[in-house]
Image (spheres, rainbow, N blue to C red):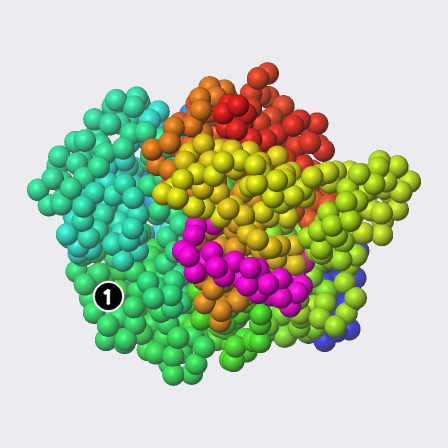
Amino acid sequence: MADHQADELEQALRRAVRGDVSFDTASRALMTMDASNYRRVPDGVVAPRDADDVAAVLAVCRERGVPVVARGAGTSIAGQATGLGVVLDFTRHMRGIVSLDPERRTAVVQPGAILDDLRTAAGAHGLTFGPDPSTHSRCTLGGMIGNNSCGSHSVAWGTTADNVHELDVLTYGGERVRAAQGLHDLPARLRDGIRSLAGHHLALLRTGFPELPRRISGYALDELLPEKNADLARALTGSEGTLGVVTEATVRLVEAPGARALAVLGYPDESAAAEAAHTLLPYGPLTVEGMAADLVAGASGLPKGGAWLFVEVGGATREEALSRAQEVARAAAEATTGHTVVADPAGQRALWRVREDASGTATRMPDGSEAWPGWEDCAVPPPRLGAYLRDFRALMAQHGLRGTPYGHFGDGCIHVRIDFDLLTEPGIRIFRAFSSDLADLVVAHGGSLSGEHGDGLARAELLPRVYGDEMVGLFSRFKDLWDPEGGLNPGVLARPQRLDQNLRFDPLPRRPVDVEFGYPHDKGDFSAAVRRCVGVAKCRNESVPGSGVMCPSYRVTGEEKHSTRGRARLLHEMLAGEVVQDGWRSEEVRDALDLCLSCKGCRSDCPVGVDMATYKAEFLHHHYEGRVRPAAHYSMGWLPVWLRAASLLRAAPAANALAGVPALAALAKRMGGIAPERDIPELAREPFTRWWREHARTVPRAGNDARTVVLWPDTFTNHLSPSVGRSAVAVLEAAGLRVVVPPGPVCCGLTWVSTGQLDRARAVMRRTLDVMAPALDAGLPVVGLEPSCTAALRTDLPELLGADPRAARLAESVSTFAQALEEYAPDWRPPTVDRPVVGQTHCHQHAVLGDAAERRLRERAGLTGTLSGGCCGLAGNFGFEDGHYDVSVACAEEQLLPSVRAADPGTEILADGYSCRTQLDQLAGRKSRHLAEVLAERLR
């Protein structure tokens, strides 16, 4: 669309709708992709407020011949949620649960309502919505209706179509339709057309569809048969937004079992598991899921085997559910290699997370190479699954491809990511040839090209192989009946585009981009690192994250550009250069990354291991290269330099006094780019390293046979909280360890990394390696106290200095305080504290270092309770930077501050991170301590 046409369209939409109209570069870039291999660029995005807004958008677009695509959470895997023309984003405003009737077991929802929100509301009445895709925490009901989503419990509760009662729909032509059973409420044109289409092809509609529980492909024209009372709601479910736009839906709810139990059954191999799955259906399971060892290698809690079935059963009580799960295990015993029955809800959740994250973990092969959707969810009759899987694996081998099938074995539906080469012409030819051959294989087994996610751009071209030309011709007639102008989601289902068109990789650079970090898991290729985001959108989870972290800024703002996926999309478009055209200078990418806290939560919580903190540092380095940076980059990015200077000059008392003068503090914050709401932290009068030099001279040392550890004097411990360092020395020495401190200044470089000053970070890190060389040569372990600095040594340092072997040696030698005690003083008993705790697990600890040793140490010391997940919101320099205060506070209010306020008197408030302690001090007025301080106090 020409610029003047886009401008005119935007202005017309702004006049017509009350919702948000966005034609800016960032908004368009965010909507180019879903969770598929495909990419289509829209002209603009509208977030309607109600059905009248939707009607107004359709009217404006109809007058100008502009396509419209309805979009939910954008987790579709076949490309149908990519946009041309105007994208309707229902996730912002039209996301309510209008009503819920527990007596009738129905709910009325808007298309942007999140599935888990409906399940929570229904759960208060002992009900649930049956279909539950693995994306249940962020997928929308409108998207589920569009794709006829299923999820793992379809063996019990069916597909979305089985659970839809009525739909309120707007056609591209502006007609308002109430779709239910029967055609009497339809406009005459539609009623007569549907009766004619169905009435003249009764035999074809009765015999032309494969019989299996997961037949999702094509239009469900068989639902129009008179013996089904022309169930129009079911016929429209799964039409992928090509026939009408759903503005409201009445859905059915089912009774949720009072308790559930999980039988995990081991089998020698995948074929054995697949062949056994349908034999378990007579036992009335809620789900029968399958996966093989090549997907879940190393997962804990699984019984012996090369493949597994997860069989969940329900019961009125835990005992009844457990008994039924044990019955399933006994019935399957002859064919299994072992089994585990889990009735504990936490244990079940841990095992289900393995399955739910598979859509992300399967995107990387064991050797790190990329794997892609496209043939994500074919389905066959369940008794045919074992034979189909053998033929499927043989077909992959024939084409030189690899993949890891898993999924809904009880329904004959598998998911798989395959290592297609979608970057080169020969690879794309193989992709096309394999797709054609696989379609024939699916048909030979009596299956469906799609068993869950729909056809979209990925499979619709091959529908004639399944249904034949006559049935596909009826699909086109049905499309034309509803959308004669072809304005809704063109190129999808009816008259589809080629499956190798619109691939999202087409515009990406074919040569590696010149970057600073090593990206070792992506072979040094920044484009490959960005491609890690496949769009499953776990980062869009708006619920309280529990023990997770990702993605704090999205949960605060609710804006796609502040999710990990949104930022990855913008980086993708920056590399593509079509929508975002300014490269590293892009202000759109900079603005999206501005609210990234660099918490590193995505590094561990994202199923595909996107590391947005590293991408942000990389971008900031290039964005400001040769240019003046924001003031905060100089004040806080260079913080180690300023603090060391203050220490050398013995200026801490004077600096603290000046910071206590409001006018001077305000001036300093304004000049330093620091949020005016923040207090300037107090500098320590005696840095830890100065105290250490005196301590090392006056305190008797441990014997020569004691294990020596190097205590890392990070900037925050050294200059801002030296009591942590002193306490750590006391505890480590009490545990029988000999403590040494580096002989010269050392720094992990974190503050320069987080502000994207990577040249300076490298210089600091190299000097640090020079100082640490003797300790590294001696093989001494290094103990970190500040989680962010310890994590930087573990990851950022070797990824920036990959060519220096000392960097890897230092990274490997680093452990946390609790890890060091556990490994090097395993027989030491900590002092008994016997006190409940609240507080914060540092986000870098969660994402990079792990906190299992810390939890065990707390337990041994009698510190009971759990620490908050999520992020404290201060996150190093982030919460101090001007403009970030409100987001920083909102992050803290999600979990940390409420838990501290609710704590009983006498509860110990723990926070190993300096940022977390500062946030608690400044927002809650509560003193928190490092675990080392709590233990050292009891030693005394």
Q: Main secondary structure of the magenta part?
A: helix
Give the residue displayed 65% in from the left and 54% down from the top: 751
**Residue positioned most to the right:** 663
Q: Nearer the viewer, residue 238 or 264?
A: 264
Residue at figure coordinates x 44%, y 38% from the top left = 702
- Comparing 97 with 493, the one in front is 97
Give SS at disc 1: helix
Residue 208 appears at what percent x and percent y? 29, 61
In the rendered structure, the answer to whether residue 262 lies left or right of residue 791 reads left
Q: Is residue 660 left or right of residue 5?
A: right
Residue 860 visible somewhere in the drawing: yes
Residue 905 in percent (x, y) is at 59, 16
**Farthest residue, direction top:** 905
| Residue 678 left/right relative to 502 | right
Which kind of residue does numbered mark 1 sit on?
Phe
Q: Is residue 774 magenta?
A: yes
From what the image shows, is residue 371 above or below residue 679? below
The percent coordinates of residue 933 (x first, y second) are 56, 31
The residues colored magenta run 755-782
Residue pointed to by mark 1: 392
